Image (cartoon, grey):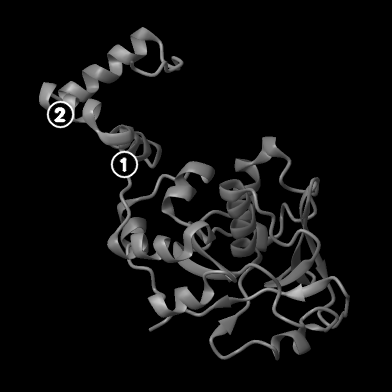
Amino acid sequence: MEPIVSRTLSVHKEHEVLLKLEAAGLCDELAQKVVDSKGNDLAKKVVRLIQNGGFEPSTSQKRAREIMDTNMFGVEEAIQHFGVNPSKQQLAVLAEVPFSEAVLEQCKETHILVAVFPMSILDIRGKVAKQSLFYEQDWYNKEAFAKGGGVTEWQLVRKTPVENSTGRNLDEQQALLSDNEETPSSRVMIYTIIGHFKATGERLSENIWVRCSDLVSDGYRVYVGCFDQYGLGIAHDWVNGRYDRLGLTSSLKFQN
């Protein structure tokens, strides 16, 4: 006996979809393969491909996914959660993950591998405006750091502040970074925090703030965090300030 499936499409919509598939080459033989697929796997793959806008991950991306698991916000997640429509050039840039498997294995519990698209902080905020994922703030609307879109790239971003970086000023915090670490922009950090939450439900920087690489127009350093039920906060402060709940964020530099 076939399982009962609740209907989500109208008869008219089902007919339109079927006509499209037939025009693309669907025949009785191919349709039967979908019907006969074990556990409905083939149909699930078709739906997933549609959800991803036709995107299929490269071998490099698939291997990274196997290692990083949910600690990867890839092209698929960017399409699904941020409504990104990647260009061929952007997909080509992201086709090869620039970190070795050994590095990914080492960082799979501590970092998020992120496919970053050129979205500004204001763009990201606009994408989730109905979900209350940002504090109600407007002070940064005209600031350059919030309006810049950046570039398409892979980033490997720490999930937690640099160890022992709280309670220190900026110079003291940056002295804790290793040679292969750097401080990402607030845009990259916000993209990572919001994207990871939408994909997994996990809140990064929930009870802590982290300094980023940006400066506001008055020369103060940008920091983000305290991502609670009211949303994610964005603030700025004197670089020499020391606070118990203000650490430093970091990401790994690209491997050559």
- 180 to 234, vertically: above or below: below
**19 relative to 201 in the view: left or right:** left
Q: Residue 22: x, y in percent?
A: 17, 22
Residue that lies at the very extreme toward the front in this rendered image: 1
State the mark number for residue 146: none
Which corner quadrant of the image does residue 227 belong to? bottom right
**If you read the primary sequence from the N terminus, does the residue marked by circle 1 or circle 2 appear first?**
2
Q: For numbered disc 2, what is the local secondary structure? A: helix
Q: Residue 111: x, y in percent?
A: 57, 69
**67 relative to 1 in the view: left or right:** right
- 91 to 175, vertically: above or below: above
**100 relative to 109 in the view: left or right:** left
Amino acid carrying label 1: it is Gly
Q: For numbered disc 1, what is the local secondary structure? A: loop
Report the number of numbered marks.
2
Label 1: few (<14), some or many (≥20) within 10 Å? few
Question: Does the residue at mark 1 contact the one at mark 2 (Cβ under 8 Å)?
Answer: no
Give the CA separation, mark 1 to mark 2: 19 Å
Q: Nearer the viewer, mark 1 or mark 2?
A: 2
Which corner quadrant of the image does residue 163 belong to? bottom right
Q: Residue 188: x, y in percent?
A: 59, 63
Q: Quadrant of the N terminus?
A: top left
Identity of the residue drawn at 35% across and 14% down: 13
Question: Which residue is label 2 attached to?
Answer: 30
Label 2: few (<14), some or many (≥20) within 10 Å? few
Identity of the residue drawn at 35% across and 35% down: 44
Amino acid carrying label 2: it is Leu
Q: Quadrant of the C terminus?
A: bottom left
Q: Nearer the viewer, residue 123 or 112?
A: 112
Q: Nearer the viewer, residue 123 or 14?
A: 14
Q: Is residue 131 visible?
A: yes
Question: Which residue is label 1 attached to?
Answer: 54
